[in-house]
Image (tube, rainbow, N blue to C red):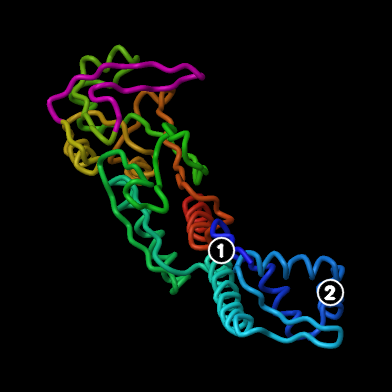
Amino acid sequence: MNTNHEASPLPADLRVFLTVIRKASFAAAAVELDQSPAYVSKRIRILEETLGTRLLHRSARRIALTDAGMRAQQWAERLLENLDDFMADLNQVRQAPRGLLHVCSSLGFGRNHVAPAIAELAAAYPDLEIRLDVFDRAVDIVAEGFDLEIRVGDDLPVQHICRQLASNRRILCGTPQYLARRGTPQTLDDLAGHDCLVLKERNSPFGLWRLQAADEEHTVRINGTLSSNSGEIVLQWALAHCGLLLRSQWDVQPMLDQGRLVQVLPAYSQSANVWAVYPTRLADSAKLRVCVEFLQARLKR
């Protein structure tokens, strides 16, 4: 009997083999497997050809294992048990949120909004181990080993799955003191005469504000002597009456309510929706699915 060195035994054939041994009959094995005796005989023949050895002695009244068959029985039981454990473990990964979840986000949004939500998620799912990294640069989530990115803005990667978590926009603001000193802009052209606080964050264009009004986009070149890659620093400067800023409404709304900031040119804003970006389907990872759904409910709230 020639061994088929190009193939490995199929798990289905090993199951047929063990069923024949347990039933001590091709016909009885066929009944249990809901197959024909010819099918059982064919699968045993293919298994023997694949392994290159005879596994069973057949006679009119009984079936007996060869020496190789006895060794094959031990290995088949071990292999199929390991395969069952493997499938059960994979199913647990898909069904139970557990293990390491590596999340990334931008500096300001990650600290102010994602981090508190992650703390609540960790309390709700103690079997999760969550690592949150924040950056001021673009991130290749696959190459850098992240399961999930929480991203602000609608410039999304086409190669990954993206789900919107919450609606948001950036608005123009200044303090009442700054506006009293420099005047309140009435048109986009008026911004050229103002100190505009420049934020260089990730891939955003430096020195340009792209604003929407009535479904039209306007690009405004801004002037200012102060710039930073930190939105929190730019906000501090605005509160110190240093100029106008373009900032997420989520971040400035408390200050608008308190009167510490005043919105200007309210017809203009910049889309800053919050997105989850991930390379794997949610159905394939319980920890990822739970995190995305939790963040969506939390951020909408």
Left or right of 247 in this view: 90: right
66, above or below 126, in the image: below
Left or right of 262 in this view: 24: right
Q: Which residues are magenta?
A: 203-226
Q: Which of 199/57 is in front? A: 57
Q: Which percent across, then down, holds residue 147?
A: 41, 53
> How many labels sit on residues?
2
In the rendered structure, find residue 30 and report the number of the disc placed on it.
2
Secondary element under disc 2, as helix, strand or loop, is helix
Q: Which percent across, then down, holds residue 244?
A: 25, 28
Outermost residue toward the left?
225
Earlier in the chain: of badge 1 and badge 2, it is 2
At 58% from the left edge and 69% from the top edge, which residue is drawn?
87
Q: Which percent across, then down, holds residue 114?
A: 37, 54
Q: Amino acid at mark 1?
A: Arg
Res 56 → quadrant: bottom right
In the rendered structure, find residue 278 and report the number of the disc placed on it.
none
Is 221 colored magenta in this rendering? yes
Secondary element under disc 1, as helix, strand or loop, is helix
At 60% from the left edge and 79% from the top edge, which residue is drawn?
72
32, above or below 128, in the image: below
Q: Which residue is mark 1?
A: 94
Q: Amino acid at mark 2?
A: Ala
At 36% from the left edge and 38% from the top edge, which residue is drawn?
248
For disc 2, the neighbor class at 10 Å (few under 14, some 14 to 19, many from 20) is many
Is 257 colored magenta in this rendering? no
Outermost residue toward the front?
1
Res 103 → quadrant: bottom left
